[in-house]
């Protein structure tokens, strides 16, 4: 809107005119994941919000940091401080103390053939596409974006499309292009996604990928990912994931199975008189877990503590040992190139039969760190990975079926839900 108003050259203050136009269309403005990463944006926001508030607009925003920490550590931040004062004067701040990611809390163990960690032959991808298009051959095409612009689509048919990462994230694309994809296709094959761990080397490509996932997720598009790395390594490894991996490697160095590790923890259990090879309810408290894991396999006390607290989502201070196994299962599902199955020897050999089918318990991906623009980027990484995980879950796929009135989950090995 600002660029359009400036191009008309009819207004003394384009920001004033933009604010007036926005206010004429809405009284309440909502911003999700509000952040400031550049001083130019900061200066524009200050004046824009001054006008909006003067026109009586109501602003509701969520952010990963309180107003006083916005743009913390940024260049020329002192010029941004008046905007923080404006927010504090005009808005009421609510602190919601939680790092719980509700997308991960509902994760199913299976990814149902929607995330592949290898470069699949194009013939294999095309075969999967043909199953979704009832045999109609996908062909190159175009879709309308806005103001006469068109987006080239490498392959498309019957609401299904394929793009390579380079098509959407290495070209000069933006949110309007991604919205055009979401409007025209209920299913998108996104191929040849590279590892995206170097923000310095690929800043624009990574930001476009994050925006693309945001748009497709919000529009509930089904995406089949072909990537160079598993979800929890695609955009770099968070501190939480590193702690789980440290524990996994420490166990594997000393024991052939998780069950053997648990048996070595016998002296630290709350019900040590029971044999954990038969007891499905054996549990351990936080203090004994940290001490026992450190002494038994040499994992750092910090990593052991973080693993315990990420699994202990209700903060009870006590965990069944099988909850720790389930957390490791979830970690390996999302970290390993070859995903474990319910027959994985390391995870499940010797597991008490009374426990029933193995399950995966999601852990939080929150990435601890200093308050700076770099942490804002990490928050975006974590949100993106979390959304990818949700997009390949059973619940997301079932919602997708209802929204687009489809019945093709059988092609992904998922029973079709009742209509």
Image (spheres, rainbow, N blue to C red):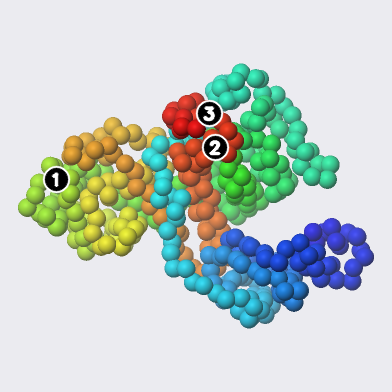
Which residue was labeled with disc 2?
402
Identify the mark nearer the N-term, 1 or 2: 1
Asked if residue 37 shows in the view, the reply is no
Q: Which percent across, then down, holds residue 23?
A: 76, 66
- Disc 1 versus disc 2: nearer the observer: 2
- Residue that appears at 65% across and 35% down: 185
Residue indicated by mark 1? 279
Looking at the rendered structure, the secondary structure element under dot 2 is helix
Residue that badge 3 annotates:
407
- What residue is drawn where x is 56% and y is 51%? 198
Q: Classify residue 341 by image quadrant.
A: top left
Q: Could you tell me how far apart the alpha carbons at marks 1 and 2 are, in whole angstroms?
A: 42 Å
Earlier sequence position, callout 1 versus callout 3: 1
Instruction: Classify 10 Å Cα crowding around label 3: few (below 14), some (14-19), many (20 and above).
Output: some
Of residues 312 and 163, which is closer to you in this image? 312
Evaluate whether residue 91 shows in this view. yes
Q: Going by the image, does 83 lie left or right of 413? A: right
Q: How many marks?
A: 3
For this rendering, which residue is in front, 205 or 402?
A: 402
Determine which quarter of the picture holds residue 135: top right
Disc 3 element: loop
Q: State yes or no: discs 3 and 2 in contact (Cβ < 8 Å).
A: no
**Is disc 1 surrounded by few (<14), some (14 to 19) or many (20+) residues within 10 Å?**
some
- Residue 367, above or below 151: below
């Amino acid at each position: 809107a600002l660029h359009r108003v400036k191009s008309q050259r009819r207004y003394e203050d384009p920001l004033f005119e933009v604010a007036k136009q926005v206010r004429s269309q809405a009284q309440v403005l909502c911003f999700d994941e509000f952040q400031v990463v550049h001083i130019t944006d900061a200066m524009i926001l200050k004046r824009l919000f001054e006008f909006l508030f003067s026109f009586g607009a109501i602003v509701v925003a969520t952010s990963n940091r309180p107003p006083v920490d916005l743009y913390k550590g940024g260049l020329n931040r002192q010029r941004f401080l008046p905007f923080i004062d404006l927010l504090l004067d005009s808005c009421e701040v609510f602190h919601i103390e939680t790092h719980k990611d509700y997308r991960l809390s509902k994760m199913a163990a299976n990814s149902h053939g929607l995330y592949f960690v290898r470069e699949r032959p194009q013939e294999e991808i095309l075969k999967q596409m043909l199953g979704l298009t009832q045999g109609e051959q996908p062909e190159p095409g175009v879709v309308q974006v806005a103001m006469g612009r068109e987006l080239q689509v490498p392959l498309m048919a019957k609401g299904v499309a394929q793009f390579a990462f380079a098509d959407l994230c290495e070209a000069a694309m933006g949110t309007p292009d991604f919205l055009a994809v979401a409007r025209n296709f209920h299913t998108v094959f996104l191929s040849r996604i590279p590892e995206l761990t170097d923000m310095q080397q690929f800043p624009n490509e990574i930001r476009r990928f994050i925006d693309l996932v945001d748009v497709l997720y919000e529009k509930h598009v089904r995406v089949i990912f072909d990537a160079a790395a598993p979800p929890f390594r695609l955009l770099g490894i968070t501190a939480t994931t590193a702690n789980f991996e440290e524990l996994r490697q420490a166990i594997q160095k000393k024991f052939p199975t998780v069950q053997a590790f648990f048996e070595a923890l016998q002296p630290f259990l709350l019900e040590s008189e029971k044999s954990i090879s038969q007891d499905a309810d054996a549990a351990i408290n936080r203090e004994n877990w940290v001490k026992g894991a450190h002494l038994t396999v040499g994992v750092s006390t910090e990593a052991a503590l973080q693993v315990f607290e990420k699994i202990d989502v209700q903060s009870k201070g006590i965990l069944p040992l099988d909850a720790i196994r389930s957390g490791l299962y979830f970690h390996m599902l999302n970290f390993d190139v070859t995903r474990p199955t319910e027959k994985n020897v390391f995870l499940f050999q010797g597991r008490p039969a009374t426990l029933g089918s193995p399950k995966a318990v999601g852990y939080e991906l929150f990435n601890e760190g200093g308050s700076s623009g770099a942490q804002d980027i990490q928050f975006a990484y974590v949100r993106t990975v979390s959304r990818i995980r949700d997009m390949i879950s059973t619940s997301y796929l079932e919602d997708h079926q209802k929204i687009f009135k489809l019945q093709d989950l059988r092609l992904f090995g998922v029973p079709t839900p009742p209509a």
